[in-house]
Amino acid sequence: MGNFQKTNDFNEIVYGRRSIKNYDPSIKISREEMTEILAEATRAPSSINLQPWRFVVIDSDEGKKTLGDLAKFNKDKVLSSSAVIAVFADKNSFDYAEEIYGKSVELGYMPAEIKEMQLNAFKPLYAAMPEANLRESIILDAGLVSMQLMLVARAHGYDTNPIGGYEKGQIANAFGLDDNRYIPVMLISIGKAASEGFQTYRLPVETVTTWK
């Protein structure tokens, strides 16, 4: 367990998760613990391990006021939460391939010749990839890390809510990011629930699954 984790109980983490509407505004999450939460979340898988997710942690009053104006229908969640994590997908994630694969060689995770073979194979593929295909890939990866982040938050004793209702066309610029490079994926509010979240019905496996 990490330094701040409260539980490793799988059932508590998965079945206890709720989308929370109201948070206790007195609860703060230290940047040390938030760093641990993000580090655990980034153990999520990604296409060829490029890890295209990028986070903006909005935990100051000023930052939350700016975000609240961009998420008017979710303003109460934004303002009462300990923080809101804005998740973006980085269209330039291949720029980090050399660092990722080089460090894997340095740590003994991968032979140097495999690194060279893979980078030589992947580089032209990514250079020629249509933007629509790239967007689809990196948004999928950012979705994986987002779900993992919400489960990690539960392990730390916190609650979350994934938010899609905000001004996606304005958020990157509002927080100093290049909106041509960074694609907004979702907001995740995090904190201690002020009221218990509602239980929700899930369709049975038979409805959502086909066996072949």
Image (cartoon, rainbow, N blue to C red):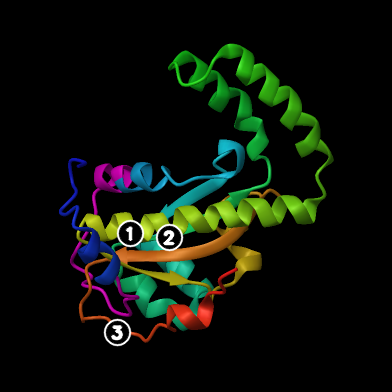
Task: Check if mark 1's residue and mark 2's residue have beta carbons within 8 Å.
Answer: yes
From the image, tell me which residue sits under label 3. Answer: 199
**Quarter of the view holding residue 48:** top right
Q: Of 198 and 12, which appears nearest the observer? A: 12
Left or right: 22 in relation to 137: left
Marks 3 and 1, how far apart in space?
16 Å
Local crowd at mark 3 within 10 Å, few (<14), some, or many (≥20)?
few
Q: Magenta segment, principal secondary structure?
A: loop
Residue sitting at 31 percent across and 76 percent down? 20
Residue sitting at 40 percent across and 55 percent down? 148
From the image, tell me which residue sits under label 1. Answer: 151
Q: Earlier in the sequence, mark 3 or mark 2?
A: 2
Asked which secondary structure carries label 1, the reply is: helix
What residue type is disc 2 on?
Met
Marks 3 and 2, how far apart in space?
18 Å
Q: Of 181 and 135, which appears nearest the observer? A: 135
Marks 1 and 2, how far apart in space?
6 Å
**Quarter of the view holding residue 7:** bottom left
Residue sitting at 56 percent across and 71 percent down? 211
Task: Using the image, tell me which numbered label, if any, was put on residue 47.
Answer: none
Q: Position of residue 129 (x, y in %)?
A: 80, 44
Residue 151 visible, this angle: yes
Local crowd at mark 2 within 10 Å, few (<14), some, or many (≥20)?
some
User: Over which residues does the magenta segment extend?
Assistant: 17-36
Task: Using the image, tell me which numbered label, if any, was put on residue 147.
Answer: 2
Q: Of 120 and 193, which appears nearest the observer? A: 120
Q: Position of residue 201 (x, y in %)?
A: 37, 86
Residue sitting at 52 percent across and 47 percent down? 54
What residue type is disc 3 on?
Gln
